[in-house]
Amino acid sequence: MTRPLLETVDLKKHYGGTRKLLQRPKPLVKAVDGIDLQLAPGEVLGLVGESGCGKSTLARTLLGLERETEGTITFDGQDVGGRGASAAREIRSDIQYVHQDPGAALDPWWRIGDTLHETLKIHGVTDKAERDARIEEMLLAVGLNDSFRRRYPHELSGGQQRRVGLARTLSLRPRLVILDEPTSGLDLSVQATVLKLMLELRAQYDLTYLFISHDLSVVERLCDRVAIMYLGRIVEIGAAEQVFSKPAHPYTQALLASAPTLERQEAGKPIEGDPPSPTNRPEGCPFHPRCPMAEAACRQVVPDLADLAAAHRVACPPALRTLTPQ
Amino acid sequence: MSDAILSVRDLKLSVKGDAGLAQILDHVDFSIHPGEVLGLVGESGCGKSTLIRSIMGLPPKGARIESGSVTFKGQSLMDPKIAQGLRGREIGFIPQDPFQAFNPVFTVGDQILEILRWSGLPDDPKGGRYTKELRAKHRARLIEVLHAVQIPDPEEALTRFPHQFSGGQRQRILIAGALASRPSVILADEPTTALDVTTQMQILRLLRELAKDFNVAMLFVTHDFGVVAQICDRVTVMYAGQTVETGTTRQIIDAPRHPYTGMLMACHPERATEITGIPGQVSSPLTPPPGCRFAPRCPRATEACTTARPGLDRRADGRRIACIHEKEVA
Ligand SMILES: Nc1ncnc2c1ncn2[C@@H]1O[C@H](COP(=O)(O)OP(=O)(O)O)[C@@H](O)[C@H]1O
Ligand SMILES: Nc1ncnc2c1ncn2[C@@H]1O[C@H](COP(=O)(O)OP(=O)(O)O)[C@@H](O)[C@H]1O
Ligand SMILES: [Mg+2]
Ligand SMILES: [Mg+2]
């Protein structure tokens, strides 16, 4: 790999667990618990997992909105970790975020144009002509004509609101964009047009994407690589084509089998149990209580990612044993 | 074919509001047979939720039925008295969002028993008071169905608060609430959209089994044909308030015939050769295009499409299609 644009080593974000004077102790929540990630410039990495597995927490920690509990974050070769929110955002201004529900992120009383101006002002673009030029360019790039500046958020459809959300983020000229469930709640017909736009914008502006989703079909279509996350850890990562055609981790297999297909009624046994909660984390491999392959060692040892093939890693010793030639 | 249990015939509904007259439903037409699961598919804004509410006898404020009918076992659901008597008893409902359906400050048991108190069970004494014995009977029935939806330890579950359950568990409890009165039809408005895929698949399987075990028919609203394939026997597709195509699940998924159905299907990742989508958006019910409402987005539209609404004609293969360009094929 060329030098990664973003790299994390053993990144952790834990909440609670401390006891302040006269306060009840909050339970320890290991929302993100040891993540090693590398994003190559220009790639789209998908991050997939059930709700509560820590995707948004990882996003906020990478952005610098939350201070990591442990581990390092390197952006473009520079150590950007270990800072409070405002210092972290300053040094990581090349990383921007697209909110899951951009409609909710728009001020209902402000015209779209005013919101876009304000965003740029907050980020230090003081020259009005410069702001105007950027807004015009970005609205055009996301397929909205200039009249949208004068509209209010409620006058926009769901798809148009997502486009405004993209325009807003891209007007800040980021290099890495973290998209947190950017198409959830949209119809498939609209989702497809928004995804297509995202791919066009990536090419046009040389962007790198971390694309968070719980929808595997979206990730499969858009991403170069995927990482599967479970209870704060990555359990499988690899080229999208590899992971989708030869899923190795039992959890990845279960996720794929749960996606409803057009072709037939699924007849096999569904994955049992609920999405897990980090407040009562099982010992050993976090997936073992729901895992059909679990053996004694899985209940004791937390497995690390290990190479399965070139650019395909999985954290499951039984899967590695059966899938690698002896 | 056996007689329909629920029929919607040529339903046309408008709502008068500040912004003008919203012509939300325009000749919706389908029926459901006993024990059958019918999928109702269409993009957001097509009028699916308005239709469900109208079937329950709870149309939006200011709504006017311009023509058509909704009947359940031969009784008109447009009569508010009749609708109220059937709602929650013979006609059950499962909402979209298990996170918003509960009040956080009451136990789930109290909330569902309260609903059963007002709807009543079919075998409750007529016109009787709500006694301790009646409540105990409702509670026993609820516990029975909580077992059926696979809630572990139902007795204890009733004493817990909504936040103590996961989304999937809450949806199971709501399904139990809908089933307790042994309805013959359940209306489900996107009941799995808010859930993770893994939980969604569990709930779909459960509903499939329950539909059989309880012999209950279902109107299942969704915008995902993958979900349709898992649970529905037949599908009806709606666009901007108009029924455009109805057929069996395999007919519609394997060979959609209405241009809108075809374009929707082509958006599904399993069918899409490239990422496309449907250009444009669903028209506002305030300004519905004349004739076929899909014409402005339809690649096959001609002038004739904009002059008259196409009839929903039955075809040789048994489906009904509202498109003048979809001629009979062998
Ligand atoms: N500020 C916080 N304080 C305590 N726990 C939190 C906080 N933010 C998130 N969590 C917990 O961390 C876990 C991961 O949450 P999140 O990152 O939102 O997951 P996802 O985005 O994958 O659904 C959840 O159990 C959540 O309740
Ligand atoms: N009370 C109302 N007054 C006016 N328009 C309404 C009202 N309720 C819904 N609508 C409009 O009717 C259309 C159909 O809405 P809805 O039934 O919620 O569709 P769906 O459930 O298919 O997304 C939408 O355009 C919506 O804005
Ligand atoms: Mg999240
Ligand atoms: Mg709806």
Image (cartoon, helix red, strand yellow):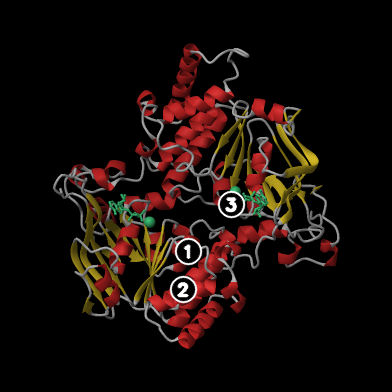
In the rendered view, does B58 fall on the left or right side of A28? right
Q: Of A182 and A216, which appears nearest the observer?
A: A182
**Label 2 SS:** helix
Marks 2/1 in contact by CB < 8 Å: the verdict is yes
On the image, the x and y values in percent for residue B52 come to 64, 41
Chain letter for the residue marked with disc 3 in the picture? B
Give the distance between the C-alpha atoms of the residues marked 2 and 1, in whole angstroms: 10 Å
Q: Of B228 and A120, which appears nearest the observer?
A: A120
On the same chain: label 1 and label 3? no
On the same chain: label 3 and label 2? no
Kind of residue at disc 1: Pro
On the image, the x and y values in percent for residue B275 come to 55, 68
Dot 2 crowding, Cα within 10 Å, few <14, some 14–19, many 20+? many
Give the distance between the C-alpha atoms of the residues marked 1 and 3, in whole angstroms: 21 Å
In the rendered view, does B143 fall on the left or right side of A276? right
Kind of residue at disc 3: His
On the image, the x and y values in percent for residue B251 come to 67, 49
Q: Any mark on residue A168, and which?
A: 2
Which residue is identified by label 1?
A102
Residue B107 vs B283, above or below: the answer is: above
Marks 1/3 in contact by CB < 8 Å: the verdict is no
Kind of residue at disc 2: Arg
Residue at the (71%, 31%) spot, across then down: B80
